[in-house]
Image (spheres, rainbow, N blue to C red):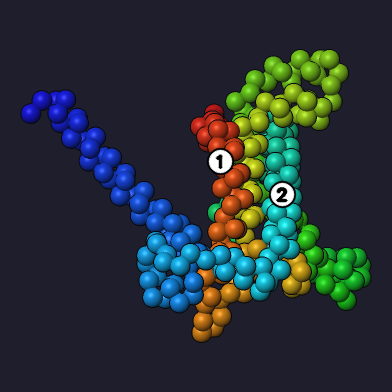
């Protein structure tokens, strides 16, 4: 058997394996879409089928009739976009400081920052909740943080804890380290302030990194469920992920509306990735810059 024949056989097996893996990965997504268009009776009678005998939009109508889905959608969009803006700006600012500024304790502080990434988020939920609830002079609290609810049941309870993460700082620092220091030195000689150097010179050069971080932050914020459920008590402030849990009861689940709402909830993240995938790939490729 020739070498070329062996290579072709390996290619065939590789494509077959890739197809099988892709099918296993994509099938749940296709099932979700198919189920969203099925009548309730058909969902239980032919649950694994991707084809419906009675195509229906009733589940999508029921989503908006049962809960204020549009309001939940806008709440999630606002919180996700706010998280993107704060993480990009503050992450870039901190990343620039660690990469381009020389100050005492820089390496120690950065090591402590990286070590915080090893702490599971579940462990910090209770301390974060207590800090937000007992924040002084906010939400009816006195100067000692007592008497009110603080930031609880307020959008700030979502935005502030997630304003910037350790990963955002690390990710941006890696990009800034790939840029030459000569740009900053020349700008300092011309009398530019440090913030102006960061804002006008370096920040525009890390557009792929900013967009990549923005995509990851948007996806994380959009899909957040546990934390919004804990700190937001008002139904008008619920996010889309918390709102979808309305269709899951103790002894029953409304699969049709749940799948329809999930399909709608998936659209923003897909659109963001589709239109920004070019920068996302560039950002992932260059994020492993020099230490």
Question: Mark 2 — residue?
Answer: 81
Q: Residue at x 84, y 21 (%)?
A: 192
Q: Position of residue 101 (x, y in %)?
A: 72, 30
Where, quadrant-wise, is the C terminus in this rendering? top right
Q: Is residue 110 visible?
A: no
Identify the residue at horizontal 86%, vertical 18% (top origin): 191
Residue at the limit of the structure toward the front, as seen here: 54
N-term-proximal mark, 1 vs 2: 2
| Residue at 59% across, 58% down | 264
* In this view, 197 is above or below 239: above
On the image, which quarter does residue 98 sit in?
Answer: top right
Q: Residues within 10 Å of mark 1 (few under 14, many from 20)?
A: few
Q: Tell me where residue 155 appears, x and y as whole percent.
A: 78, 61
Q: Secondary structure at mark 2?
A: helix
The residues tagged by marks 1 and 2 sit, at their Cα atoms, a distance apart of 17 Å
- Quadrant of the rendered structure where residue 121 is? bottom right
Q: Quadrant of the N terminus?
A: top left
Q: Which residue is mark 1?
A: 274
Q: Which residue is most to the bottom?
A: 251
Q: Is residue 160 left or right of residue 178?
A: right
With respect to residue 227, does 10 lie above or below?
A: above
The tally of labels here is 2
* Closest to the observer, 22 or 109: 22
Q: Residues within 10 Å of mark 2 (few under 14, many from 20)?
A: some
Provide residue 241's location: percent of width, then percent of height.
Answer: 62, 64
Residue 160 in view? yes
Tell me what residue is drawn at x 52 percent, y 77 percent. 253
**Pointer 1 and pointer 2: residues touching (CB < 8 Å)?**
no
Which dot marks residue 168? none
Regarding mark 1 in the picture, which secondary structure is present there?
A: helix
């Amino acid at each position: 058997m020739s070498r070329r024949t062996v290579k072709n056989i390996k290619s065939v097996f590789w494509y077959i394996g890739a197809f099988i893996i892709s099918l296993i990965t994509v099938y749940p997504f296709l099932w979700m879409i198919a189920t969203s268009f099925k009548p309730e009776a058909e969902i239980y009678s032919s649950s694994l089928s991707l084809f419906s005998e009675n195509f229906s939009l009733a589940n999508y109508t029921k989503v908006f009739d049962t809960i204020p889905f549009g309001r939940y959608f806008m709440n999630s969009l606002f919180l996700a976009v706010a998280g993107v803006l704060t993480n990009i700006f503050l992450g870039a600012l901190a990343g620039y400081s660690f990469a381009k500024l020389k100050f005492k304790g820089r390496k120690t502080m950065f090591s402590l920052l990286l070590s915080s990434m090893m702490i599971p988020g579940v462990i910090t939920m209770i301390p974060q909740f207590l800090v937000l609830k007992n924040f002084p002079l906010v939400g009816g609290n006195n100067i000692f943080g007592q008497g009110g609810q603080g930031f609880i049941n307020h959008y700030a309870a979502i935005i502030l804890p997630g304003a910037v993460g350790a990963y955002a700082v690390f990710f941006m620092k890696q990009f800034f380290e790939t840029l030459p220091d000569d740009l900053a030195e020349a700008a300092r000689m011309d009398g530019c302030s440090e913030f102006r150097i960061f804002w006008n010179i370096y920040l525009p050069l890390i557009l792929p990194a900013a967009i990549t971080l923005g995509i990851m932050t948007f996806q994380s914020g959009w899909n957040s469920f546990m934390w919004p459920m804990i700190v937001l008590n008002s139904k008008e402030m619920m996010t889309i992920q918390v709102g979808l849990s309305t269709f899951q009861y103790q002894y029953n689940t409304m699969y049709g509306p749940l799948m329809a709402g999930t399909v709608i909830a998936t659209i923003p993240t897909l659109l963001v990735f589709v239109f920004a995938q070019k920068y996302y790939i560039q950002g992932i490729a260059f994020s492993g810059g020099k230490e």
